[in-house]
Structures are given as structure tokens and as C-alpha cells.
Image (tube, helix red, strand yellow):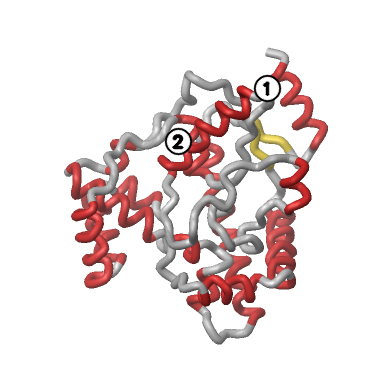
């Protein structure tokens, strides 16, 4: 979600002083009403990594978006791109029949894919139904391979914290975002014409303002905390499936040692 312009506080973008000292790529490259798929991310990240390596630097892919990371490491899905007519058909069915009808259609053909898609994730749900209707095949057929790509060398590191510590850090982060002006940032995005259907505004930290309009700030904060904790749990499941991942605590020394060992291969 850091790819979206104007969504700075809610996505915890690196501050300007850090970005001036340490260049970041693929931030602020989309408007909130534009889709940003895993396939697009892989294509752009490949190009950026090649550019960084050509400069003699080490590309670091950082984030917690497990599906996008897995697509980058293992290769993107081989599913065909969306056809405009099928996309329009699925969108019309979503509006007329609701998300549960689409989920039931997907579950009947591919319970594995349906079970992996969160109840609030309409983008992945509609995309899966598009693939099903376009190919007549289960979307899970096109899932990324379980092993890492052979054209790149990877050091895959995950940072693990005790659940209660993670929960408290999430609480503090949400409080800090609200204090920094998250509500005003959301209002500015809506004033620019971005509605709740914009892909960016479906992100945690933004959709709660749409869904809970007029509710007390404390209730909105609690909802953001809950949804973030649920998201963290799902992401850990994705990350644990990454091939060869090394889990560490929040230790700079341990990370530095791993990087040094990787570079000395």
C-alpha cells in the first residue's frame, strides 16, 4: 500500500529524512484508485533490483505483504490477465448478488482458493472468480511454485516477536498514526474524489473510517488494531511458507551477521 500517493500515515511510509539517506523504490507510484497487482510488483521489482545491482549495491525487498513477497521470490502466478468483459461481468454480479454469492461459486470449484481469501478481500475474491470463469480451471492451479526462482540468489529473513509484544506495538502504532493526523489524511483523500471502492482506501487504517463514519475515534482505533492484528496473523502464515526463510528476533546484530555471510558466498 506504500505504492499509493497520499497514503503516508496509514501505510507507515519511511520518513523523508530516511528516504533521503537511504533510497527507496516503488513508493508513491500509483493513485489510490488504481490497481496494483502482484504481477505488476514482480515486474517492477525485478527491474529495480537489476538497476540497484548494476550500481554495485545490495537490493533489499522489505515489507510484510506475504503474497507479493512470495510472488517475487517464487515467481508470479501464471494465470492469464483479466479480460475486460469478464471483469465487468464479475463486478456486475458482485453488485447484484453480493460477495457471498461469488465466494460460494469459488468454493464449489476451488475450496482451497476460497479458504485462502479473507472475508473482506474483495479484490482477490473477484480476481479468483475472473480466473475461474476465464479458464474453467481452479485458480489454485496457477499458484506460484513453492521453491525460489533460480535466476536470483535470496537471503530471506523474517522478524518474529511474541504475540503480546506484537499486540502492544500495534496498539502504539495505531495511536501514533491517529495522533499524526490519519483522520485528516483520510478526509483529504475523500475530498480528492477517492471513494471506499478505490483499491487504496480498502487498506486497513482507511476502510475503517468509511465503514464506521460518525463513530467515536476510540472505536475506530480499536477496529484498526483488531484488523491489523488479524492481518499480522495471516501474514505470518504466508511468510512461514517462504522457502528457506530464517527467523530471527528483532536483533540488528543477528541480521548483520546473516547479511555478511550472504555477501561472502
Can you give x and y, in whole percent of width and height, for residue 260 in the image? Answer: 75, 22
Q: Which mark is residue 171?
A: none
- Specify whether 45 is left or right of 60: left
Q: Quadrant of residue 81?
A: top left
Write down the residue under mark 2. 43
Between marks 1 and 2, how big is the CA–CA gap? 21 Å
Q: Nearer the viewer, residue 219 or 19?
A: 19
Q: Is residue 233 visible?
A: no
Q: Is residue 73 visible?
A: yes
- Specify whether 84 is left or right of 64: left
Q: Residue at x 53, y 50 (%)?
A: 29
Q: Quadrant of the N terminus?
A: bottom right
Write down the residue under mark 1. 56
- Specify whether 218 is left or right of 85: right
Q: Residue furthest right?
A: 253
Q: Nearer the viewer, residue 229 or 144?
A: 144
Q: Residue at x 71, y 36 (%)?
A: 248
Q: Residue furthest top?
A: 265
Q: Nearer the viewer, residue 43 or 73?
A: 43
Q: Quadrant of the C terminus?
A: top right
Density class for disc 2 (Cα within 10 Å; few <14, some 14-19, many ≥20) is few
Density class for disc 1 (Cα within 10 Å; few <14, some 14-19, many ≥20) is few
Which one is earlier in the sequence, the residue at label 1 or at label 2?
Answer: 2
- Specify whether 81 is left or right of 230: left
Can you give x and y, in whole percent of width and height, for residue 116 in the image? Answer: 40, 49
Amino acid at each position: 500500500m506504500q505504492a499509493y500517493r497520499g497514503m503516508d500515515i496509514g501505510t507507515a511510509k519511511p520518513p523523508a529524512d530516511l528516504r533521503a539517506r537511504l533510497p527507496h523504490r516503488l513508493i508513491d507510484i500509483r493513485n489510490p484508485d488504481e490497481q496494483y497487482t502482484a504481477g505488476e510488483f514482480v515486474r517492477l521489482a525485478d527491474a529495480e533490483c537489476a538497476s540497484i545491482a548494476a550500481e554495485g549495491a545490495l537490493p533489499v525487498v522489505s515489507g510484510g505483504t506475504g503474497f507479493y513477497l512470495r510472488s517475487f521470490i517464487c515467481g508470479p502466478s501464471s494465470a492469464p490477465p483479466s479480460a475486460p468483459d469478464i471483469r465487468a461481468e464479475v463486478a456486475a454480479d458482485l453488485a447484484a448478488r453480493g460477495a457471498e454469492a461469488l465466494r460460494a461459486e469459488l468454493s464449489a470449484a476451488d475450496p482451497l482458493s476460497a479458504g485462502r481469501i479473507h472475508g473482506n478481500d474483495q479484490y482477490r475474491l473477484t480476481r479468483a472468480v475472473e480466473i475461474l470463469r476465464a479458464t474453467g480451471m481452479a485458480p489454485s492451479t496457477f499458484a506460484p511454485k513453492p521453491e525460489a526462482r533460480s535466476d536470483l540468489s535470496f537471503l530471506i529473513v523474517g522478524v518474529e516477536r511474541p504475540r503480546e509484544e506484537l499486540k502492544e506495538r500495534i496498539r502504539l502504532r495505531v495511536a501514533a498514526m491517529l495522533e499524526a493526523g490519519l483522520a485528516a489524511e483520510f478526509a483529504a483523500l475523500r475530498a480528492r474524489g477517492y471513494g471506499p471502492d478505490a483499491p487504496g482506501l480498502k487498506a486497513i487504517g482507511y476502510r475503517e473510517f468509511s465503514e464506521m463514519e460518525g463513530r467515536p475515534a476510540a472505536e475506530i482505533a480499536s477496529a484498526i488494531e483488531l484488523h491489523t492484528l488479524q492481518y499480522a496473523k495471516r501474514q505470518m502464515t504466508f511468510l512461514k511458507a517462504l522457502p528457506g526463510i530464517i527467523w530471527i528476533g528483532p536483533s540488528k546484530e543477528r541480521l548483520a551477521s546473516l547479511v555478511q555471510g550472504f555477501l561472502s558466498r
